[in-house]
Amino acid sequence: MQEKRLKAWGNNRAGQLGDGTWTDFRTTATTVLGLTSAEVVKIAAGGAGPAAGHGLALLTDRTVQSWGANGSGQLGDGSVFSHNAPGQVVNLSTASDIAAGGAHSLALLADRTVVAWGKNNYGQLGNGTTMDSSVPVRVEGLNKVIAIVAGLNHSLALREDGTVWAWGYNISGQLGDGTSASRNVPAPVTGLTGVTRIAAGANHNLALAGDNAVKAWGHNATGQLGDGSTINRYTPVDTELGSGVVSQIAAGGNHSHAVTGSDNTLLAWGQNTSGQLGDGTTDNRNKPVPVPGLTGVQQLEGGREHTIALLGDNTVRSWGANGSGQLGDGTTNDSSTPVTTLTALTGVDKIAAPAAGDFSFAN
């Protein structure tokens, strides 16, 4: 029996599909070189625009592999040369989680501290400087971290006490500290407690507090905070979800999703110019609307203008922009409703997409 392999599709101009080529794009899944599905614990996708991007894979031995764009050192291999096949992040042997931003990367270590590498022009590495680093550096003043996520130029960490800490770019309030001043060390997001999940879009964030309170902050020009407005928010506000237990949250470029209720109903809000909300329209929504005909969602990932969902039957659906084949359905046609992604995999249990990029991963 052939070993299962990590798969990728969509834009590949920076080698972000990891298949050993620089082919412009792939409309169906290609194989990421050298990594079997069995050794991959988690995948993360980063990117800063349609043609850029990089991938990360956390392996069972607690090391991390990286591939794709590397102009800012976001691959963490000590160089600034892009590569189209996986290579090892240096000085990392105890990673337990990973996250990928626009051109920076994060890893959570076994001791519950965080390291970061790559672009740092806004302090998104959190090490007290604004100098890029092509090797992992310690994020200052953070411990007891249980989850990490990365936006386009900012980073978030969830601590075991239910508080959220943020650092990096802040022009739209994405750090949630009541200011628009960027920070190169972590600071707490104002008024957030009891948080169990976090998600980062390009320039906005979501947090699940308790069972059903989704909080949002940051950029809101297309309604991606879901509070009924299009006003940027510099501290967290309530997303107007209504009742129902929330099991998943996800943030794409300028859009957001949540999975609610006993049947795992999918809700969407924010920018919809390419159909990335999946409601059959291209109308922006500043409050959540249901995505019809899609239940049993197990995992959700938002891309720049596309969305990817893993269903309970271990198959993948995608919708939104598809000019680079990022929906993986064999076409380059946008879709405002979910289409079946041709992953060539059975039993998918992990997916990833970059909040500011145009490609996708499945494992």
Image (tube, rainbow, N blue to C red):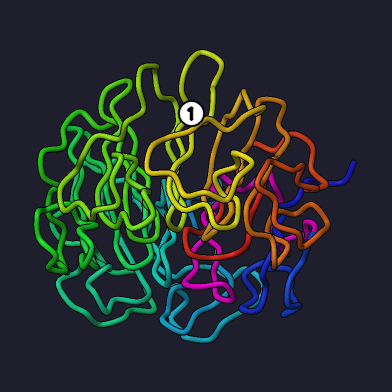
Q: Residue furthest right?
A: 1
Q: Position of residue 194 (x, y in %)?
A: 20, 28
Determine whether the residue tagged by mark 1 lies in a helix, strand or loop: strand
Q: Residues within 10 Å of mark 1 (few under 14, many from 20)?
A: many
Q: Position of residue 27 (x, y in %)?
A: 78, 61
Q: Report whether residue 251 is seen.
A: no
Q: Position of residue 70 (x, y in %)?
A: 50, 80
Give the residue pinned by disc 1. Answer: 259
**Which residue occupies 33% across, 60% down?**
203
Q: Which residues are magenta?
A: 28-57
Quadrant in the picture for residue 360: bottom right
Q: Position of residue 14 (x, y in %)?
A: 61, 78
Quadrant in the picture for residue 116: bottom left
User: Disc 1 residue type?
Assistant: Val
**Which residue occupies 71% across, 60% down?**
9
Q: How many marks?
A: 1
- In this view, the residue in front, 93 or 306, is 306
Q: Is residue 20 above or below residue 255?
A: below
**Which residue occupies 70% across, 58% down?**
8
Quadrant including the N terminus: top right
- In this view, the residue in front, 237 or 194, is 237
